[in-house]
Amino acid sequence: MSIDLKGIIPPMVTPLTETGELDEKGLKCLIEHMISGGVHGIFLLGTNGEAPSLTYELRKELITKACNIIAKRVPVLVGITDTSFNDSLEIAAHSKLAGADAVVIAPPYYFPISQNEMLDYMQTLVPKLPLPFLMYNMPSCTKMELSIEVVRRAKELGALGIKDSSGNLEYLFDLISEFKDSPEFAIIVGTESYLPETIKRGGHGAVAGGANFFPKLFVELYDASLQNNTLLISELEQKVKYIYETIYSVGQYESRITKGIKCALSVMGVCDDYMAMPLRRLDSEGRDKINTYISRLEKNAIK
């Protein structure tokens, strides 16, 4: 099965109720909000989806209900990485049954592993997968940066591409250069402010957290980057910069981006901002700040 991975693929947050159950109404509202904004795919159970904090039962429920709502309008990618090899395969099998299009593989978290161990892990896992796969480089959460050799081997095993959330521009450019003669191998950036430069150098798109709440902004930035519309790119980049400086910077938390995204969705009335333990949503002071920032963005009154 061939999937053309490109454009804006939001790492969807997981809408939850106050008691930690899946918020089905919020889920439908969020998916329709993103699809109406023109996104090119949706990534379930990534970092912003709080995947490691969710029960397997809730993960499966999310996958099933999200796939039903999306109904093949855009490709669905599901993060399956876990500390348990067999549980990763179980989520992959469920994703296939639910109608997802691909799975996403990162190094298993908690134990630091070597590049050789990652190669062995990948070469053992991939033949057992029921769906195409995308690699995911997230060293801040997995304790390792995927080497170019590992990524090259992943491509040989059939990987659709790689999402790079290292925040390391040199590494990103090395990836683009390494696979420049393989345009079917998608280089997707996770640091959304890098989108224009990624496209300019031959990359394919972004897994942009901000596309949860402002999908049209990031789709417009992607389109402007494809067209090399420097004036429009500059204008849109100012809005993205503002998001980084405001919505992504409320509170002294390492998790402030996910908290900010969920809070933004809440003040916009898309879905609530309850989070899975150990994370907790922003307090009333933080929420008031997010509300002000969203209002300025919506009114295009950025200073």
Image (cartoon, rainbow, N blue to C red):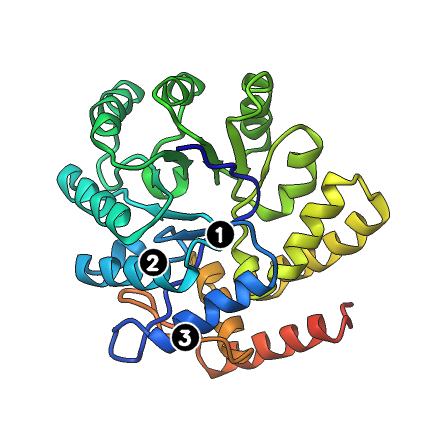
Q: x, y (%) of residue 240?
A: 67, 56
Splitting the image into 4 quarters, where does residue 25 fall?
A: bottom left
**Mark 3 vs 2, N-terminal side:** 3
The mark found on residue 50 in the picture is 2
Relative to 56, is 25 above or below?
below
**Mark 1 vs 3, N-terminal side:** 3
Q: CA distance from mark 3 to mark 2?
A: 16 Å
**Tags 1 and 2 touching, CB below 8 Å:** no
Q: Residues within 10 Å of mark 1 (few under 14, many from 20)?
A: some
- Return the residue nearer the eye: 108 or 244: 108
Residue appearing at x 20%, y 30% in the figure? 128
Circle 1 SS class:
loop
Splitting the image into 4 quarters, where does residue 58 fall?
A: bottom left
- Return the residue nearer the eye: 166 or 84: 84
Amino acid on which the number 3 mark rests in the picture: Gly
Amino acid on which the number 1 mark rests in the picture: Val
Residue appearing at x 43%, y 53% in the figure? 72
Q: Residues within 10 Å of mark 2 (few under 14, many from 20)?
A: some
Residue for badge 1: 74
Residue appearing at x 44%, y 30% in the figure? 160
**Mark 1 vs 2, N-terminal side:** 2
Question: Is 145 displayed left or right of 179 in the figure?
Answer: left
Amino acid on which the number 2 mark rests in the picture: Glu
**Tags 1 and 3 touching, CB below 8 Å:** no
Residue for badge 3: 26
Q: Nearer the viewer, mark 3 or mark 2?
A: 3
